[in-house]
Image (spheres, coloured by chain):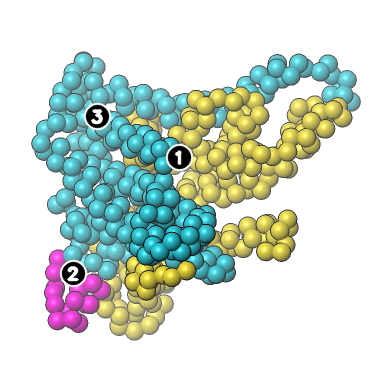
Amino acid sequence: MKSEVKARPVSPARGRRLGALVFLSPGLAYLVVLMLVPLALLLSDTVFQRGRFGGIVYEFTTENFERLLDPLYLNVVVNSLKLAALTTLIALLLGYPTAYLIAQLPRKWKTVALVAIVLPFWTNFIIRVYAWIMLLSGPGLVNSGLKALGLGPIEVLYTEGAIVTGLLYSYLPLMVLPLYAAIDRLDPQLREASANLGASAFTTFRKVTFPLTLPAVMTGSLFVFVPSFGNFVIPELLGGSKSIMVGNLIRDQFLKARDWPFGATLALALVVALVLLLLAQSWMARRA
Amino acid sequence: MRRSKLLYVPFWATYVFLYLPIVVLVVMSFNSGESAYSFEGASLRWYGELAGDERIRDGLVNTLIVAAGSTVIATVLGTMLAVGLARHARSKLLDAIALMPAVLPDLVIGIGLLVLYGALQFTLGLYSVVLAHGMFATAFVAAVVRTRLTGADTSLEEASRDLGAGPVTTFLRITLPQLAPGIIAGALLAFTLSLDEFVIAFFTIGNDDPTLPIVIYSMLRFGVTPEINALAAILLLVSFTAVIAGQRLTKIGERGPRAQD
């Protein structure tokens, strides 16, 4: 203690630089080595060729990007976009009314309703997928229900419907939470004013409530779309081998086909698509 | 406020959708029969089988090792990063780098690390998963601690400096205790995320003994057994208890300043 009191005071600027060095360098070094270097490696792999037995041959090629446009792979990308978009749309149709009603609940029930929304989200991801394998498979609950109605049995597991169900189940809470936060913040007087001026409940929603919550709609949609688009576990376990998504394709390039350069190119396309979406979202949020 | 009765349809549909699979899972875990689909009678048979299953037990131990190791790394480095970014070097670029692992798709992180470990000729194993989990968890800890730092009062730190304490003493005695709740919250988040993480572990574990989510994943690929139901029920109970306890704790923490609530 004594020596510190006597120590010559360090100039604030120098102290700050020293502090920055001490506090930042370990964490940043860690992130650079384990995140930025891998990203750089992936990026550089996209212009090289695959070796005959896996591995990479360091000769320049644009072949990987040309293959991206091959209808075979383009279809997988379009299919992933379609399934992720469908999931997002259903999440919005279920999530908006849910968030809207939660926001109207008395304080005590609000907390209960919100915790009930996030609880399933905190259970193990694989277990959540497993629950749907059980419900959707041949003798599972869905077909038992259909049988009771005199219908079925139908093949539900290993269909695109099963994939969308699994994605929805995994990411629906991410839609409800931002919507709830935005709806809860709305000034009720705005809606009252609209109603007093003779607008119907639907017109009020269309002209007042919905436009004001549009940024949250975008945020929630992004939260659902992004993890759905790049997913490979749900399509594999619930979709079987029939319909693959871009995530499965990337996984297979790395673990099965051993074509790392093409896998890296697909991953780059995935990241670019997501960055474009993020930019579009922040652009729309600023205009709103 | 008028609200249409019609709105209650999607509202209840959401909750039924979220909880139906959980209820079915828990009920079927007490099934005495072999089938995962038809309930034959109540028993604890599958809990017994689960307790004797070495794959599950090893998976659980591996998961806890990875979660503990990565939480230690992430808590130390994430806290330092948050303090450094908030107090010593304001930079949008560094902020973005610190947040990136939390935003990047897990699949991209996973294959990136696979390529890196390959280039370094690193033998994959539990420790490569620890390093990988520590990396993305660092971003989450830094973000959580950061929220406590921005808007925090710096006058105590200044007073400490004025009274002659050195930077190290000030950090240990003033800054760190002030940040403690954020650090604990960040550590809990890191631990929970690691417990549940599948994709990155899947790419970085190599042929080593798998973590629990990977064990379950490979069991699923060979069909459904009621044993997984029992495991699922236990995991559900653990995470529900943790979430509700966490909810209670934050409530108690908040009670101080606004007791009228």
Badge 3, how many Cα within 10 Å: few under 14, some, many 20+?
many
Q: Which chain letter goes with mark 1?
A: B
Q: Chain of mark 3?
A: A
Front-most of A281 and B24?
A281
Instruction: Tell me if I can see residue B108 in this picture.
Output: no
Chain A representation colour: cyan
* Magenta region: A139-155
Is the N terminus of chain A in the top left, top right, bottom left or bottom right quadrant?
A: top right
Density class for disc 1 (Cα within 10 Å; few <14, some 14-19, many ≥20) is some
Q: Position of residue B198 (x, y in %)?
A: 38, 48
Looking at this view, is A123 or B43 the one in front?
Answer: A123
- Tag 1: amino acid: Ala
Of circles 2 and 3, which is in front? 3
In this structure image, what is the colour of chain B? yellow
Q: Quadrant of residue B164?
A: top right
Respond whether the residues carrying marks 3 and 1 are from the same subunit. no
Query: What separation in Å lies between label 3 and label 1 (alpha carbons)?
Result: 22 Å
x and y, in percent, of residue B37 in the image: 26, 74
Examine the rendered structure and indicate whether residue B162 appears above or below residue A248.
above
Label 2 sits on residue: A138
Where is A235 relative to B241, above or below? above
